[in-house]
Amino acid sequence: MSDKARKLFDALDLNEDGILTRAEVISALRAKGPTLAATGDLPFWGLGDADASSALFDAADKNGDSVLTYEEFAQEVDRRFGW
């Protein structure tokens, strides 16, 4: 798993509890996405609306428990973003 995935996960983990919820991913990507893209921590094409953020969440939530661990998140973004 990449260092970029860890940095992105930490940026999206707004309450710093070590897991991501759907609302947290949507909110954080809306608020921080442009800055993360500008610094190279998120591909510009990875920016999207709430539906795209929700789809990313669904793809990463392999066990269907409605939260993302770092491992679930990193596996999906490494694959999707080519990290």
Image (cartoon, helix red, strand yellow):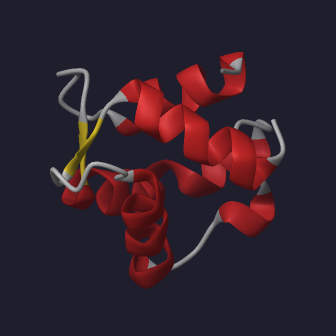
Residue drawn at point x = 44 percent, y = 52 percent: 60
Q: Which of 32 and 12 is in front in this view?
A: 12
**Along the line of sight, the residue nearer the viewer: 62 or 6:** 62
Count of marks, rendered view: 0
Q: Quadrant of residue 6?
A: top right
Q: In this view, does 8 lie above or below 79?
A: above
The residue that appears at 49% across and 49% down in the rendered structure is 32
Q: In which quarter of the image is residue 41?
A: top right
Task: Say above or below: 15 vs 48.
Answer: above
The spot of residue 2 in percent (x, y) is 71, 21
Whether residue 36 sits left or right of residue 45 in the image: it is left
Image position, residue 50 (x, y; %): 39, 78
Q: Is residue 42 visible?
A: no
Give the answer, above or below, for where 70 lies relative to 51.
above
The one of 11 and 80 positioned closer to us in this rendering: 80
Q: Is residue 19 left or right of residue 38?
A: left
Percent from the top left, x then y, of residue 74? 55, 33
Residue 58, position as x, y percentages in the image? 37, 65
* Quarter in which the N terminus is drawn: top right
Residue 9 visible in this rendered orientation of the protein: yes
Kindly identify the residue that appears in the image at 37 percent across and 51 percent down.
Answer: 62
Farthest residue toward the top? 3
The residue lying furthest to the front in this view is: 63
The image quadrant of residue 82 is top right
* Quadrant placement of the C terminus: top right
Residue that appears at 42% across and 56% down: 31
